Amino acid sequence: MKRTLLCTAIAAAATFSLPSWSSETVDYSQAAITYLNQLANPDGGIGARPTGTEMETKAGVWIKDTLTGFGYDVTAQSFKYTDKKGVDGTSVNYIAEKKGLSESTIIVVAHYDTKGAEKGSLGPTDNGAGVVTTIAAAQALMANESVPYTVRFILVGAEENGLNGSKYYVKNALENNGLKNVIGVVNLDTNAGGDIMYVHSAHSDYDAEFKSACESIGLDKTTYNYETWMRDSFIKASAKTLGEDRFVVHPTVAGYPEGETGSWSDHAPFSCAGIAIANIEATNYEINGEHGYDGYSQTTNELMWSTGYNPETKSANDREAETKWGKIWHTEFDRLDKLEEAFPGRVNKQISDSVDTLIEFLTNGDYLN
């Protein structure tokens, strides 16, 4: 479905008086930080959630119980998959929906499994941040009497070993007409931790970046969508909400035009199905990392570089000897204690900004007109 169909629906919804969300009784940003500790802090919480483990299952149950506690009817979508190494597994997607004044639907998606537990990662940034931002937004929308359009929240499993949860959801939805009213997707994956907060649209070169992902669920270039309006609309919402350009597009780098991303997260199957996406992440495309300017180095912080970071070359002091490359995801640095040591207050601030912007985006139909 194209954006023009949504505009008509939102224009009709605009005749209603929409109450704006309020934090008089609940500070949703602070609530998200509480949820992050419950999810990613092993002291009284869950901690690492490796794909296919009991801890991933435990995290899924926590997600379902939390959303149910807000008043949602939560669907647990169990699925089987074969991972990138050919190993069979099972996982669960959790789906909750807030009905809006329009049937036109925005999906908010985030994965809850983690990778790198053997290195000490507990996954507060990858992807606890996305999960709790989604959950806090769902809490805020449930407290709203009405929203301009329907919002579907999907917390997917088994992302880290092949986007299996989102692939299953999209394939199943296509078979059952479940994407009929969906006009846009916000994917939250690592929206805290890195130096710069980005919003991406899908890559304009299908063959270079999305061909394999699309063919794995039986789709091809004929349905592929790389429109930028979801990305641009989210950035507008952030500017209004935060009063500054906290969310930006990355500059053009080798292989990636300005503001475009690859197929490595849960936005990819939705792009393959013809839906515009906004992919949110915190990293640093200005670093010449292990494989160039590809966004896989998240920070210039010296703690995350074994030979030190050189601001003149925007790379390691010794590229041949470097082992850490400014990476947080899947490493010993993706844990709350080390993140707070390296970046006092950063993770909380980035999650707060993500929550506030997402709520504004989902409750104000002006951004999609």
Image: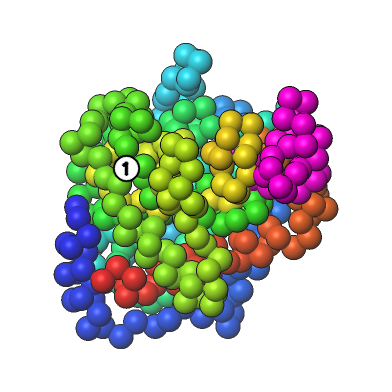
Residue 321, percent from left and from top? 78, 26
Magenta-highlighted residues: 296-325
Residue 257, percent from left and from top? 41, 45
Which residue is farthest bottom? Answer: 17
SS label for mark 1? loop
The colour scheme is: rainbow
Residue 203, percent from left and from top? 36, 42
Which residue is farthest front? Answer: 312
Name the image quarter holding the C terminus.
bottom left
* Residue 102 belongs to magenta span: no
On the image, numbered disc 1 is attached to which residue? 204
Query: Foreground: 314 or 14?
Result: 314
Residue 292, percent from left and from top? 58, 35
* 317 to 150, vertically: above or below: above
Kindly tell me whether residue 328 is visible in this rendering: no
Q: Residue at image x 56%, y 40%?
A: 293
Kindly tell me whether residue 344 is visible in this rendering: yes
Q: Residue at image x 49%, y 52%?
A: 250
Quadrant in the rendering for residue 175: top left
